[in-house]
């Protein structure tokens, strides 16, 4: 029964988060959660890795699109996950509801390893930001 | 004949008697500083010391004076002692005029505004909230514990190493100093006026050693610019004899490091996360030491520091940020990771979002109100000199890479100006062509900035302070 439930969960959520405790086994340094998100970031050889988990794939697609818009235009597809940009020095990639950014040598292999380490569930506990609301140009709440 | 038994201080008190007294000593002394005294050799050559109950604690004391120890070599307790030389007697108070605590304060900004400061980001590492709490006594093992420096240590100080100090640049800092619990200055039966504190450049505004605490205020402002002041408050405890003459009892030093900021933090968000940290502002204020205390000058100096001196380079391959995340895909929620940046944890390759985040974070930490703005979208570039770059180019990403999807800068709505540490503009009449003239982006008018940055139509579309972690 337990096995069946787990299988159902995986079927409904084929790619989920990567626990921060996996950072060392992925060759990463000490991970840090990013406040207000279900994201952690850790030093990687030559750069860093950012691992962001979203509750649904649609949100992950939106996050991937947003992040890709912050990069220079014309980056090639990297062939990692469902969507990806970059090369072996930098990769932005999405697989399911997981979005990964890796900078450093061997970025493609490291991104693949991160996806392979994904487990069902949240990657890290969301650390909420206190009272952040949109403000106008001089700090007045909208 | 008067025999001078010590020479380091002139402890001669003629008092109001008609002739020279047989024994001349300060009314109080700290044995750890040593006592100098004189007595008339006609009365005798050595002295006997008796405690308040008449028990002899030491005899045969001659030159250079009593060291405050009994016949076993132990320091005597504080209190009143009688000195006998032949038939002549006098009393003196043994005190231990050591400091155990120093607390910095303010008066709400009238003459001193202390800015709350952490050693590191709240919740990230320790936060020293109680100054000098580990120091409880000056008489431990018969010796005073040393007074920790006020804000002297960087990094992660152990409990008791004091609070870091930041004051508005024009403040006259206020320090309240506490004398040791066992100093028993009061028990020595000294009147308030018999022990006092003298500190050059500082004025006692409250208290006295006999009351246990003394509050002093610096006579002059800590500075006239932004930066870091490191100085030692030299404090002399003196006793006053019957004649009005004063004698040094002990000289104490309080080393201080004061960060001279423009004002309190100017983040719109409040709370511990937005209190400035030593680990961040120390290098920044040292880098901009001597900067005029205005918001414009502070942001100018920060841009110069970040652009020129930190060894950062623009990510000309991917244009990706290393230290900033747009939380929830929101251009107004750029979260700058100062904790990682001060260690350059993710390397030295940065983008515009990072540089805007750096200036906004440092600026608001030291009281120079700043925001970032997002300039959009997908526009071609005029000639720029990217941070860490060698040459001007209008294609910073190489062949075909001649545009930005967006660009983040630092702005001030009230000053109507733009700062940018990501790049320098071409400051000549034709920013779209060579030759190029270096133009740092320091308080540039917003419209001029856009015209020099791009030949395309662009606009400031989002403006925010973002958040910090």
Image (cartoon, coloured by chain):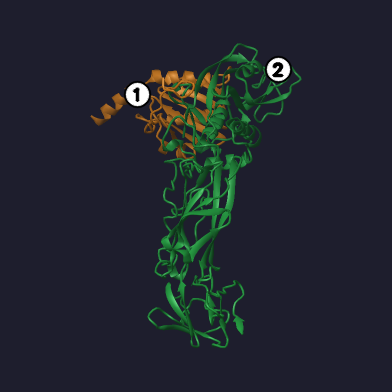
Chain colours: A orange, B green
Q: Which residue in the structure is indicated by mark 1?
A: A13
Quadrant of image for the N terminus of chain A:
top left
- The residue lying toward the viewer, choosing from B169 and B230, is B169
User: Does A21 sit above or below residue B206?
Assistant: above
Q: Residues within 10 Å of mark 2 (few under 14, many from 20)?
A: many
Q: Could you tell me residue B163's position as x and y percent?
A: 47, 49
Residue B239 visible, this orientation: yes
Residue B180 falls in image quadrant: bottom left
Residue at x-position 50% and y-position 57%: B148
Please tell me the numbered disc located at residue B420. none
Q: Give the Cα separation between the discs numbered 1 and 2.
A: 52 Å
Q: Is residue B401 visible?
A: no
**Position in image of residue B58 (x %, y %):** 47, 83
Q: Nearer the viewer, mark 1 or mark 2?
A: 2
Q: Secondary structure at mark 2?
A: loop
Is A10 situated above or below B208? Answer: above
Task: Residue A99 in the image: state x and y as whole percent.
Answer: 45, 25
Measured as percent of width and height from the top left, residue B237 is found at: 52, 64
Residue placed most toward the observer, B24 or B317: B24
Q: Is residue A5 above or below residue B228?
A: above
Q: Quadrant of the C terminus of chain A?
A: top left
Position of residue B383 in the picture relative to residue B180 (left or right)? right
- For label 1, the SS is loop
- Residue behind mark 2: B431
State the residue at coordinates (74%, 23%): B437
Q: Chain of mark 1?
A: A
Q: Are marks 1 and 2 on the same chain?
A: no
């Amino acid at each position: 029964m337990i096995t069946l439930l787990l299988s159902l969960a995986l079927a409904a959520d084929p790619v989920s988060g990567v626990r921060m405790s996996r950072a060392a086994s992925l060759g990463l340094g000490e991970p840090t959660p990013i406040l207000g998100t279900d994201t952690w970031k850790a030093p990687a050889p030559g750069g860093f890795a950012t691992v962001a988990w979203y509750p649904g794939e649609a949100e992950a697609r939106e996050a991937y699109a947003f992040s890709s818009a912050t990069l220079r235009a014309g980056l090639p597809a990297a062939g990692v996950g469902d969507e990806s940009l970059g090369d072996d020095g930098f990769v932005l990639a999405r697989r399911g509801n997981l979005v990964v950014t890796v900078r450093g040598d061997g970025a493609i292999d490291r991104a693949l390893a991160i996806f392979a380490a994904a487990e069902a569930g949240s990657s890290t506990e969301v650390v909420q930001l206190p009272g952040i609301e949109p403000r106008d140009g001089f700090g007045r709440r909208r | 004949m008067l025999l001078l038994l010590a020479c380091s201080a002139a402890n001669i008190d003629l008092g109001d008697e008609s002739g020279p007294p047989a024994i001349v000593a300060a009314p109080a002394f700290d044995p750890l500083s040593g006592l100098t005294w004189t007595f008339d050799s006609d009365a005798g050559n050595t002295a006997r010391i008796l405690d308040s109950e008449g028990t002899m604690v030491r005899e045969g004391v001659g030159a250079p004076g009593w060291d405050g120890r009994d016949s076993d070599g132990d320091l005597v307790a504080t209190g009143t002692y009688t000195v006998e030389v032949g038939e002549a007697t006098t009393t003196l108070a043994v005190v231990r005029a050591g400091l155990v605590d120093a607390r910095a304060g303010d008066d709400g900004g009238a003459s001193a505004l202390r800015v709350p400061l952490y050693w590191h980001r709240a919740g990230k590492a320790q936060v020293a909230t109680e100054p000098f709490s580990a120091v409880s006594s000056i008489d431990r093992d018969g010796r005073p514990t040393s007074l920790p420096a006020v804000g002297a240590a960087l990094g992660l100080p152990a409990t008791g190493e004091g609070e870091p100090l930041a004051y508005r640049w024009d403040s006259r800092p206020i320090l309240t100093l506490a004398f040791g619990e066992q100093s028993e200055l009061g028990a020595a039966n000294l009147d308030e006026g018999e022990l006092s504190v003298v500190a050059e450049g500082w004025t006692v505004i409250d208290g006295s050693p006999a009351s246990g605490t003394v509050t002093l205020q610096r006579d002059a402002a800590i500075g006239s610019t932004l930066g870091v002041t490191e100085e030692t408050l030299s404090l002399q405890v003196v006793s006053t004899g019957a004649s009005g003459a004063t004698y040094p009892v002990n000289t104490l030093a309080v080393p201080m490091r004061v960060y001279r900021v423009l004002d309190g933090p100017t983040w719109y968000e409040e709370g511990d996360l937005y209190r400035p940290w030593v680990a961040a502002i120390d290098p920044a204020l040292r880098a901009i030491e001597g900067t005029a205390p205005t918001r414009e000058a502070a942001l100018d100096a920060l841009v110069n520091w970040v652009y020129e001196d930190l060894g950062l380079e623009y990510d000309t391959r991917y244009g990706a940020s290393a230290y900033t995340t747009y939380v929830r895909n929101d251009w107004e929620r750029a979260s700058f990771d100062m904790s990682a940046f001060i260690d350059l944890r993710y390397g030295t390759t940065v983008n515009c979002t990072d540089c805007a985040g750096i200036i906004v974070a440092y600026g608001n930490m030291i009281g120079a109100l700043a925001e970032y703005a997002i300039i959009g979208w997908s526009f071609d570039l005029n000639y720029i000199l990217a941070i860490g770059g060698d040459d001007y180019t209008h294609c910073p990403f190489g062949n075909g890479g001649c545009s930005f999807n967006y660009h983040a800068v630092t702005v001030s709505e009230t000053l109507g100006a733009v700062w940018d540490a990501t790049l320098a503009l071409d400051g000549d009449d034709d920013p779209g062509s060579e030759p190029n003239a270096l133009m740092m982006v320091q308080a540039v008018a917003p419209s001029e900035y856009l015209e020099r940055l791009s030949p395309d139509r662009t606009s400031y579309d989002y403006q925010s302070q973002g958040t910090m972690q």
